[in-house]
Amino acid sequence: MVGPVRPQFVLFGSSIVQLSYSLQGWGAILAHLYARKADIILRGYSGWNSRRAVQVLDEIFPKNATEQPDLVIVYFGGNDSLLPHPSGLGQHVPLQEYIENMRKIGTHLKSLSKKTRLIFLSAPPVNEAQIYGTSVPLGQRLRNNESCQKYSEVCLKLCHEMNIKAIDLWSALQKRGNWRDVCFTDGIHLTSEGSNIVAKEILKVIKEAEWEPCLHWNSMPTEYGEDSPYDPVGPDGKTTVNVSNWTFLETKEWD
């Protein structure tokens, strides 16, 4: 552990989370904006479903930890929504079990501390043509949009019941023109354009949430943000310029 102790934001989920630090992903965007505000901790595992998440809840989020996260962003559903494989193996989780698994995740995370806030991301759509092309017969396609939508809807309904902030990725991505062509690298995982949408939705929820303290990057204190004689010298050659809040991104886009 290194100091000073910062607020912790944990990204917990499957490959949509694990890959969020790549290709100008949404996790990388958050890490950049919160660089001197909070630690963005990645706990994303490619291929995982809600079953595997439930198995390790106590290990990843121990209730006796000295410091508990201030925010946990959770994404499971895309792999759960796969249709059952004939072998009985694989990632598919029946809809009702998925609901109960997500309820267990939400209940556990809520119990960590009074300060821990939650945001759940629902299953996004997919581009079936990009995933399968013309090489896989319809009967062998285990991932489809109809199933994704069902899992997205029950996730949002559960979040409403549990008073958990939720983001409807199913709808958010489809608001983008030509979403099938611009949002996915392979029909499933997100391009930088798709990640921009996710990041904006997350930041919108954080900004509008009536949380105390506010967790929006532009409202949080900057670590070592005080003026210093060791800052860069200003244009007048006599004073220094405080650069502690420089993000090197177009900040209006993320406000």
Image (cartoon, helix red, strand yellow):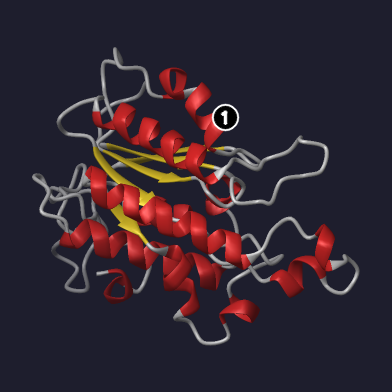
Q: Is residue 54 above or below residue 129?
A: above
Name the residue at the bottom extreme.
Answer: 177
Along the line of sight, which residue is nearer the eye, 156 or 71? Answer: 156
91 left or right of 123 in image: right
Rendered location of residue 195, percent (x, y): 50, 65
Residue drawn where x is 21% and y is 46% of the image? 163
Q: Looking at the rendering, in which quadrant would you find the C terminus?
A: bottom left
Q: 10 Å neighbourhood of mark 1: few (<14), some, or many (≥20)?
A: some
Mark yes or no: residue 171 visible: yes
The quarter of the rendered structure image containing the N terminus is top left
Place of residue 91 in the rendered image (x, y in percent of width and height, measured from the top left): 67, 40
Q: Place residue 9 in its image quadrant.
A: top left
Point 74% across, 55% down: residue? 142
- Residue 123 visible here: no
Percent x, y of residue 18: 57, 45
* Kind of residue at disc 1: Arg
Residue found at x 30% / y 17%:
63
Which residue is denoted by mark 1 in the rendering?
52
